[in-house]
Amino acid sequence: MLETDLRAAVERGFGARADAAFRYADLLCTTGIERGLIGPREAERIWDRHVFNSVVLAPLIPPGATVVDLGSGAGLPGIPIALARPELTVILVEPMARRVGFLRDCVAALGLVGVEIHYGRAPDDVPKCQVVVARAVKALPALSAMALAGPNRGAELLALKGASVGREVAELSSKGGFQVEVLDLTDPAGGSATVARVRRSG
């Protein structure tokens, strides 16, 4: 992607916080790789595969919601959501100390006021929220049961999914107790993203 095209895509996705999004991508490609959170080969596709893919969730979240990013890892999708929607409260839940350290560095470097970091493990350590987001955590049946549990039974799950989404949705539907909708979205650079939106049905 040409630099001018990339800039335009970042501005479409992040608006006034485009420069902060560039700083976050740089952190992923430097410190993130050095600390083993992102593979060395991911640097050349950091925007399409990671940042733009994550920010597609931002418009789906209600105004003023509290959002939990379950198994945040390197901050995906939570940090792109927080950059695009600064009025949200975003809680990054991560059980691994070295990843928590990276998240703290990112939040400080980017000046993310509405972002909290929760060093804990699902489902016992997940704060109450209206929306749970997840990317590359578990298959949809296990993820839905874990994310929409306890105080978050009434929340909504937005899960970024890949080619296995059809099989995972069929398995979840066969178990009953959940309503699931598959959304085919377009990211700011014109790429595609698949999101499973899940709620408990009772």
Image (tube, helix red, strand yellow):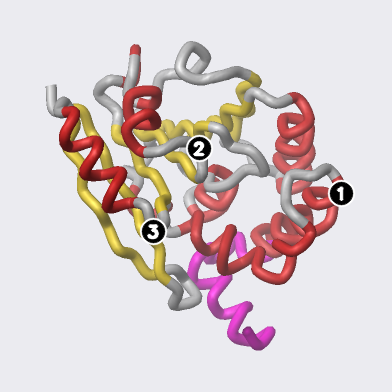
Q: Which amino acid, by three-letter code, is at mark 2?
A: Val
**Towards the viewer: 154 or 115:** 154
The quarter of the rendered structure image containing the N terminus is bottom right
* Residue at image point 34% right, 12% down: 150
> N-terminal of the two: label 2 or label 3?
2
User: Where residue 137 is drawn, which disc sits there?
Assistant: 2
> N-terminal of the two: label 3 or label 1?
1
* Residue at image point 79% right, 59% down: 40
For disc 1, the marked residue is 34
Number of residues whose C-alpha sits closer than 10 Å to that of mark 3, classed few (under 14), some (14–19) or many (20 or more): few
Q: Which amino acid, by three-letter code, is at mark 1?
A: Glu
Picture coordinates of residue 202, whole percent (x, y): 13, 21
User: Where residue 163 is drawn, which disc sits there?
Assistant: 3
**Distance of label 2 from label 1 (alpha carbons):** 22 Å
Residue 3 part of the magenta-drawn span? yes
- Residue at far right of view: 34
Instruction: Give the total of numbered labels.
Output: 3
Number of residues whose C-alpha sits closer than 10 Å to that of mark 1, classed few (under 14), some (14–19) or many (20 or more): few
Q: Secondary structure at mark 2?
A: loop
Q: Marks 2 and 3: which is nearer the front?
A: 3
